[in-house]
Image (cartoon, coloured by chain):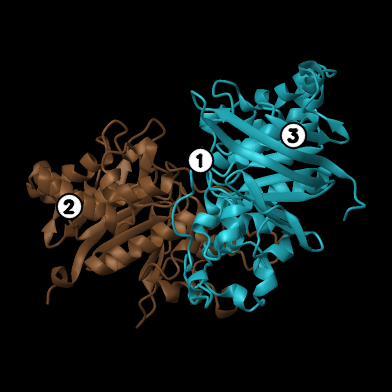
Chain colours: A cyan, B brown
Amino acid sequence: MSEREPLLRVEGVTVVYSVGGRRNVHAVSGVSFALFRGETLGLVGESGCGKSTLARAIMQLPRPTAGRVILDGEDITVLGSRSLRALRSRFQMIFQDPIASLNPIRRVGESIEASLRTKGGKSAAERVRRAREMMTTVGLDPEQHYRRRPFQLSGGQCQRVSIARALMTEPQLLICDEPVSSLDVSVQAHIINLLRKVKSDYGLSMLFIAHDLAVVKNISDRVAVMYLGRLCELAPCADIFSSPAHPYTRALINAVPRPGPCQPLAGTGMLSGELPSPMDPPSGCRFRTRCPRAETRCVMVQPELRQIAPGHLVACHFPLREVAGPDEDHRPLMDRPDN
Amino acid sequence: MTVSDTHLLTVENLSVTIPSSAGAVRAVDRVSLALERGRTLALVGESGSGKSMFCRAVMGLLPRSAVVPGAARVTFDGRDLGGLPRRELAAIRGREIGVVLQDPLSSLNPVIPVGRQIAEPMRYHLGLSSARARERAVELLAAVGIPQPEERLGAYPHQLSGGMRQRVAIAMALACEPKLLIADEPTTALDVTVQAEILNLLGRLQRERNMAMVLVTHDLGVVAGRAHETAVMYAGRIVEKAPTVELFTRMRMHYTRALFDAIPRIDDPPHRELGAIGGQPPGPAAQRVGCPFAPRCWRAEERCRTEEPPLARDAGENHSYACWFPLSQEERP
């Protein structure tokens, strides 16, 4: 896969917030990955792990504290604000709360049309025509919905408006930050199917952020798992679910409910404890305080992301694959003999 | 043994209509169900299907403008809730019926420490002294899995994570040892990891305390293994109701099947097209003719559009459904 040219390269991106005095929060610490053309990369992790902060750092909203974001060969972290603005039409974002992310007093059709105004070069009539076309593409009826305001639409319809607005500028990269987590399961299915369709129709590359692994598995080609500001595993979708290497990834997989009468209940072998505060992250491996396999080395040495199989990267001193056979991987953490 | 001895909660023919500028909205439509002590009933449906309004009706917390037609009867622990004066209803609520809502940040008071919020119902309903209520609050925080409970008594909701806040809300609901716990989308606002923990916690507490529970959710995926019985709601009506295992293995409604197919599964291969239900749920004020799901149902025929199917069960079975053309053996998942 290394021969493929990545559309987006994220290199050592770090985001530090000051929280008064000399105290800092390292929301994202030295994250690096590549997103290939036409690929969907899923990014998963619990609330507070820095997923959204990373997404915003890629969008330069605001710029990261350190590290480079290279879009199509160009480092966008060093661009002046004017050149960055000119480039913005090429990377667009969809947010979690579909109603709050739209201007409440603007008609949704105008919100969609306005995203072309910033790009320039099109007449008003042309912009409206394109906006109406795009509404049809995302499954809205321009006759019925163009003049509605966000509060007159359902959450799913507003998310369609957001998708239409993002697609208007013909972006290469679409970043979706929890686009379905505030929607009903039935509506969620529509939006995921729609995202998959527009991704292939428009040849998009997509960074898809979610906390629900079943959703991420459904839409992604590769999956990155994030914990407390760092990547802990990155692998092709099929690999990471069949043989997760990081104990955290496996715990996340075990937490997913499986619908059906004879399925085991989710949450056997759950993580104990809370996510530590990013203001005072644990030394060494950040997951060690909740990890059933943690040893002294995990306290002393921070594990770096390394390759353990083709395309399968993990940041763990004792990855599950090396010691555990594939059969053992399905057992709840607590039942394992080495605990 | 009379009905009220075995059943903690019985609801008969409950409808709720809310007047609006677009006409009367029928939020809950002729719902009847019964819940035994110590059992869990799951209510599943999309947004706007009437699940939450049903819960509010049971708790006597309907909006002022809501109208409940006279045929409705809600009996809780042998008492007719509809006939009780407000004051007595308030005494039952919080003491005998506990409630956990979706968003713990908005259901907790942001400017009062959580310890006081947990202690308050015990002082109000049980008349405990403040020292005793404080002790109990520590016990409850420990019971819901909050580490260092004594130190957390003084914490404000914003200082806790979403999962911790929901644990506090559960501790508060359990404070007076209710006989019935209504959990309205208790995990929808939470991460998947926390969701499993909270559902397991509710299940454990329920068994320990022999509490009955109504678990409301839009996700059919979370009820498997967690509810004795499951009722699927659509447009204010219960359209299918059965013991949970029976529902999953022998579902009869096309709508239930559609909800089931919409769930992304972690055991499925990537890029499986999800089964999405076409169309929208009927507007709440829409005229009701025929089956409310007919406009979205791929199986619908003329009869479905003109004649409403009753919620009925086959002889000798504990599985009711409202469909003229139920799923056959081959059509089930």
Amino acid tagged 2: Arg
**Which disc is residue A280 wearing?**
1
Instruction: Give how far across and how far down residue A84 sits, in percent.
Output: 79, 22
Please tell me whether mark 1 sits on a helix, a strand or a loop. Answer: loop
Q: Which quadrant of the view contains residue B231?
A: bottom left
From the image, tell me which residue sits under label 3: A67
**Which disc is residue A297 wearing?**
none
Q: Are marks 1 and 3 in contact (CB under 8 Å)?
A: no
The one nearer the camera, B318 or A56, is A56
Amino acid tagged 1: Asp
Q: Nearer the viewer, mark 1 or mark 2?
A: 1
Instruction: Give how far across and how far down residue A65 sits, in percent.
Output: 67, 29
Q: Is residue B290 visible?
A: no
Q: Real-space Cα distance between discs 2 and 3? A: 51 Å
Instruction: Give how far across and how far down residue B112 sits, in percent.
Output: 26, 34
Residue extending farthest bottom: B316
Chain letter of disc 2? Answer: B
From the image, tell me which residue sits under label 2: B136
Q: Is residue B233 left or right of residue A238?
A: left
Q: Is residue A335 left or right of residue A160?
A: left
Please tell me whether mark 2 sits on a helix, a strand or a loop. Answer: helix
The one nearer the camera, A39 or B13, is A39
Task: Please tell me how crowded label 2 is: few (under 14), some (14-19), or many (20+) other residues with Cα within 10 Å.
Answer: some
Task: Please tell me how crowded label 3 is: few (under 14), some (14-19), or many (20+) other residues with Cα within 10 Å.
Answer: some
